[in-house]
Image (spheres, rainbow, N blue to C red):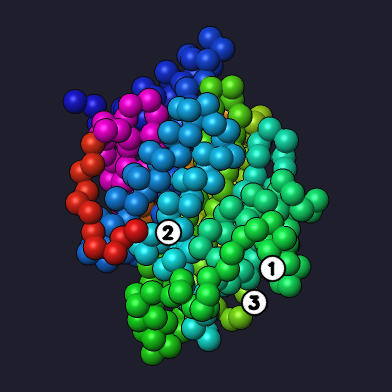
């Protein structure tokens, strides 16, 4: 029986050996947001991230692109009320959902970002269209809405259907508290994938923070802060205190520091997360893959749900020391009412 760290070390050695032999093993990794999660919501988050990892991995197994794989993985979580993205997203001070998202193709450095989007269940799909069809990197406001309609996206009618009872209760609790942005469950969802040819993509989607000002933008749509992918470096998706993450461009910093110091992503990610928090406060988390498919899962928050599939095995966890393995064919979490 291997301890979690022994399993990870063995996985790294195997990945490096395969890379030297000219073979990259496909991997799809996701996160469901860093923060403090109540015990009753952890099973729903684990069910959601393991499903998202499996769905994204199946795209790779069918020879789909890494961009499609991360998009499909994120869509699963955008449609799940247990996550702060799409349906179930956090509410701004006025009780509305405003969504941010980004996606990046590590082969071409193409990017697509959006912010302040309302009443669209899958902002990550629109972000992909921004990347591939708009001629720009980042759209907001009326121009974003006009582009979405031109591309055939349908906004929910009547408005407000993305709001859940949980998010309304969270806003009321926030209003009754000291109104700190750094309290509560937190959120953001993301995915990173690598295929057999070494192509990498990353995607991130969020509702932001409960009680945020109308028009607030966090790290999620900022390339280099919340999302980054480069076939020569790896891919990262961030979650946590976005107003702080933006100040240190954490996604790019993790990948670039690992390259410059010739170190593995895991210790670099751990160190940079702690350095950010020590200097500026707040907490954060990330999932990442290096250019050969080695996995990094790091967070200094109490919880961060995550999962990845490699071959026929799915790994998953929620707390700092939580590391579990199961066959990809297993479904260890009972369906929860209203989960999807």
Outermost residue toward the right? 135
In front of the other: label 3 or label 2? Answer: 2
- Is 25 displayed left or right of 127 in the figure? left
**Magenta-drawn stretch contains 257:** no
C-alpha separation, residue under disc 1 versus residue under disc 2: 20 Å
C-alpha separation, residue under disc 1 versus residue under disc 3: 15 Å
Residue at numbered disc 3: 215
Secondary element under disc 2, as helix, strand or loop, is loop
Residue sitting nearer the eye, 186 or 151? 151
Mark 2 Cα within 10 Å, few/some/many (few <14, many 20+)? many
**Of callouts 1 and 2, the N-terminal one:** 2
Locate the N terminus and report the quarter of the image it occupies: top left
Locate the C terminus and report the quarter of the image it occupies: bottom left
Secondary element under disc 1, as helix, strand or loop, is helix
Residue at numbered disc 2: 79
Q: Do the residues labelled 1 and 3 touch (CB within 8 Å)?
A: no
**Of callouts 3 and 2, the N-terminal one:** 2
Q: In the rendering, at what x and y percent does residue 113 appear?
A: 67, 56
Q: In the rendering, at what x and y percent does residue 246 appear?
A: 63, 61
In the depicted structure, whether residue 85 falls above or below residue 105: below
Q: In the rendering, at what x and y percent does residue 271 appear?
A: 50, 46
Image quadrant where residue 6 sits: top left
Residue at numbered disc 1: 145
Which contiguous range is marked in magenta?
306-329
Residue sitting nearer the eye, 323 or 271? 323
Mark 1 Cα within 10 Å, few/some/many (few <14, many 20+)? some
Mark 3 Cα within 10 Å, few/some/many (few <14, many 20+)? few
Outermost residue toward the top? 21
Outermost residue toward the bottom? 176
């Amino acid at each position: 029986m291997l301890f979690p760290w022994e399993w990870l070390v063995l996985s790294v050695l195997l990945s490096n050996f395969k890379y030297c032999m000219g073979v990259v093993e496909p991997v799809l990794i996701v996160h469901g947001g860093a923060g403090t999660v109540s015990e009753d919501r952890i099973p729903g988050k684990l069910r959601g991230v393991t499903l998202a990892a499996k769905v994204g991995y199946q795209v790779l197994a069918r020879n789909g692109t890494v961009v499609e794989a991360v998009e499909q993985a994120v869509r699963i979580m955008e449609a799940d009320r247990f996550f702060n993205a799409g349906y179930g997203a956090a509410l701004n001070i006025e009780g509305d959902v405003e969504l941010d998202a980004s996606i990046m193709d590590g082969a071409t450095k193409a990017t697509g970002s959006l912010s302040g989007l309302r009443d669209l269940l899958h902002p990550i799909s629109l972000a992909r269209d921004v990347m591939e069809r708009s001629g720009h990197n980042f759209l907001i406001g009326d121009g974003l809405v006009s582009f979405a309609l031109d591309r055939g996206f349908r906004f929910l009618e009547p408005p407000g259907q993305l709001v859940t009872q949980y998010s309304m209760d969270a806003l009321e609790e926030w209003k009754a508290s000291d109104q700190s942005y750094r309290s509560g469950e937190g959120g953001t969802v993301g995915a990173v994938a690598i295929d057999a040819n070494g192509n990498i993509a990353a995607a991130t989607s969020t509702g932001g923070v409960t009680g945020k000002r109308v028009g607030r933008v966090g790290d999620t749509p900022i390339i280099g802060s919340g999302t980054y992918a480069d076939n020569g470096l790896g891919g990262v998706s961030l979650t946590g205190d976005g107003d702080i993450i933006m100040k240190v461009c954490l996604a790019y910093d993790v990948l670039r520091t690992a390259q410059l110091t010739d170190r593995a992503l895991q210790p670099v990610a751990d160190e940079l997360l702690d350095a950010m928090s020590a200097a500026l406060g707040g907490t954060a988390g990330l999932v990442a893959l290096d250019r050969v498919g080695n996995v990094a899962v790091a967070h200094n928050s109490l919880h961060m749900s995550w999962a990845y599939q490699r071959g026929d095995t799915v790994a998953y966890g929620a707390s700092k020391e939580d590391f579990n393995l199961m066959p990809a064919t297993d479904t260890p979490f009972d369906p929860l009412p209203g989960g999807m």
